[in-house]
Image (cartoon, coloured by chain):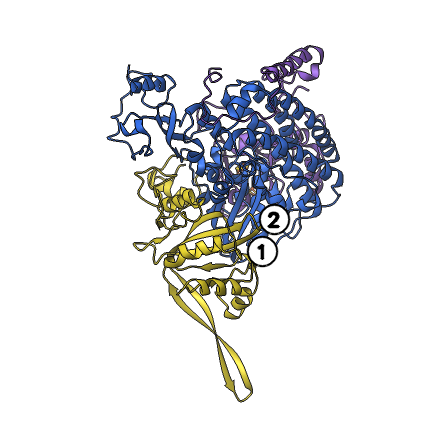
Chain colours: A blue, B yellow, C purple
Amino acid sequence: MSRQTEGQQFASALGMGNASPEGPRGDSPVLPPPAGPLYEAKPKPGSARAAEGETLEVAVGPHHPSTHGVFRMDVVLDGERIISLKPRFGYLHRNHEKLCEGGTYLMAIPYTDRLDYFCSLTNNWAYVLAVEKLAGVEAPERAEYLRVITAELTRLLNHSCLVGFLLQDMGAMGTPLMYAFREREKLVDLFEELTGARMMCNYMRFGGCRTDASAGWLERTRRVVDDFPRFLDEFEDLLTSNEILLARTQGVGKLSAELAINAGVTGPMLRASGVAYDIRKAAPYGIYERFAFRVPVGEHGDVYDRYMIRMLEMRESVRILKQALKEIPEGPVLNPKARRRNFRPPVGEAYGRLEAPKGELGFYLISDGSPRPYRFRIRAPSFINLTILEDMCLGHTLQDAVIILGSVDIVMGEVDR
Amino acid sequence: MRDPEKSSELEETAPPGLPSFQEIRRILEERVEGLRLEFIPNPAAPDQSSFCVPTEFALETARILRDDPRFALDFCSNVTGVDWLDQTVEETILHRETTDEGERTIKEIVRRRRPGFLEAVYHLYSMRARRGPLVIRQRTANRIDRVRVASLTPIWRSAEFQEREVYDLFGVRFEGHPDLRRILMWDEFKDYPMRKDYVEPDDYEYEPTPQGEAAAKARRHYPYGGAR
Amino acid sequence: MSGLGNNASGTPGEEKGASSMLGLGILKGLGVTLRNFLGSYRDPERLITVEYPEERLPLPEQSRAFPMLIYDGEDPIGGLRCVACKICEKECPSQCIYIVKDRDARGRPMKRPKIFDLDISTCMGCGICAEVCPFDSIKMDAAYERSAESRFERLLLRKEDLAKPNAYYHKIHPTEAAEADARLGIASPEPEAPPEGAPEKAA
Ligand code: SF4
Ligand code: SF4
């Protein structure tokens, strides 16, 4: 059996790529196969076997459990090594930007929840940050604290789930993910109590937050936050020194600091490569300069460092949360001067950005003085972090590509917008 | 609506951590021969005003912005397109006039038609020196056939996917981009959906509560008074 | 896990934080799962799953699902607070509200809706309509089990389906409802008033 057919069998057994054109129902019309590949995937020069043309093309996705949504990687394999990997997006493209250009400034807030549906609160904040910069509105003190608290809770939620998913990609079926979801449940319960919804919070407004937090909510949050390090210890016992995890992640998917900076990689990915750049420190927004916290930095830039950075970042988030929950003052949560209906920012443009759990999330708005934004642009961290996916995967095997993708931390709602 | 007085005032402001816009213009025009930068004031957020860089100098200017230690803008955060339709702009021109009462300034408002163009906007930061943003723009000559600008992907790799997105959704062609294909829309798609005059295909689906444009569309498909 | 033996990632990783004896890390991890497993027998707090739908958690007060229209008094249609000002229709991001003002015999517009439709197949439950309504008429319901077989029948709610008594509002969002009553200057209904179609809740 030649290598090619072996690979094809493997691919079709997994439901990837060249499966037989007949669907499960025999009577459905079979579409003619496309005339040729949509673009030529060229093998890398220098590979001897590639020169003989013995390569295998596999389309991983769009429906594949490891691709975190509807995402496709067109992979060219030489033996087991990846010699080319082209990400293909757009399966979830709904032209979010145009949608928001058609509505008022207020209408865009619930849509931002749906970008990265794990982190609706940081998405809300990034958007209102840009609008506040554009219109020169300020939020009251208590609202700023609530923003920090909800954003850091979001970070805990995102990072713990990500670690669970990463382990799931590695083959640890269930356990780490279930432990992460057990903690997530406590956090989304807090969100529901504060904002009315577990995931689509729609919480922040220009000049503050929509609802105030009760004393009981703050107390429960304190309890959850105080409990969180115990979960982190347990999680680390479970994972950090696990030999399988070490073998699968160390030295895999290395990314150099130079390339990471040049390719605009942000967030934990960048810090794992050794660049101490966190917008909360580099260009503090909100009230972050009041809190003491450290920025964990990796040194190898591999998947293990990315995992570790997230574990450490959660501990720093707990630190910020403890300070914020102690210091939060009483007061209003909404600036009475900020309007919701008929809100017309002055002519101009603004770019607002913050450190979302996945990286730098930015909103670029152009106002022409009307109630609708003339231009509404989202700088989505998971989209831009995928730029170097191919560079990280070259030379690795397909199973490593899966965990490299997992360590990038993408959510397709944000990648495709 | 550009007030020349205000414009030069705004030019004295500086983007965070960088020299003032005047100074930046001086440095760049000194280093790149023949470069003329147009200052685009931004009254809402003066520190995010921008420069429009002529396409033919864009690559060279970008390289200086990245490599010159006075800027060191090593991180291109955001690349996006903007579509500007043909519009009538009002410009205020200041005349100085000497009358018997002395010198005075007369403001004259001139209306002129500005042909539409597409714009690529870059937000540049410095990760090492914690500066920015400096906003630069490139403009195409029109919206129809002369839609080329220079790709800055050779300078900042982060522009790779974002320029592809601008090409995909706005139809700006980036000269020198290594792999300019559609990214979010499928390859066979014809139009550019983010343009302001994009007409969506007439693939109406019944909607129980149509309003506005959707209601007009419903009426076209259901001639007896819309969906209800 | 088949990936164990043939992890050929090209560059062998350095041994970071690895235990002195191979396999100790795995055993430590297994210890954690064992602790959790045995702990679930000892401590009922550790049993965190809820056997939905037999068992339900109480919803927090803020919880929202889809909008409803509040009426005062006995008559669900005549008592609607809505004056058909169409503000919510304009502000709804997904444009899923459709309102037609009622007219009297002589064709003058009246302060009540003739048609008030809400398409919950496109509603995203954001609550903006409730936020902008100046008459405290449209509010967020907490009933979330709204699945239906057809997109157009049970998901397109008419004003008859949307109308809910003030007492129901008081039951699901007591604080908010009391504030609304104070704003409107009406007496709050009896707390025991039988709520209609209230979601079943088990504490
Ligand atoms: S529900 Fe409120 S906002 Fe909507 S039409 Fe009725 S009164 Fe106006
Ligand atoms: S909840 Fe949001 S989407 Fe639903 S009707 Fe109200 S405003 Fe529209």
Percent x, y for residue B1? 48, 65
Looking at the image, which is closer to me, A68 or A194? A68
- How dense is the environment of label 1, judged by Cα within 10 Å: few (below 14), some, or many (20 and up)? some
Instruction: Name which residue lies at 59% across and 47% down.
Output: A129
Percent x, y for residue A115? 51, 37
Report whether A308 appears left or right of A44: right
Percent x, y for residue A313? 62, 34
Residue A330: image quadrant is top right
Percent x, y for residue B146? 31, 55
Looking at the image, which is closer to me, C82 or A118? A118
Number of numbered discs overlaid on the protein picture: 2
Q: Which residue is mark 1?
A: B16
Instruction: Name which residue lies at 75% across and 35% down.
Output: A215
Q: Which residue is mark 2?
A: A283
On-image quarter of the N terminus of chain A:
top left
Q: Are marks 1 and 2 in contact (CB under 8 Å)?
A: yes
Badge 2 marks a residue whose secondary structure is loop
For badge 1, the amino acid type reads: Pro
Residue B54: image quadrant is bottom left
Image mark 1: chain:
B
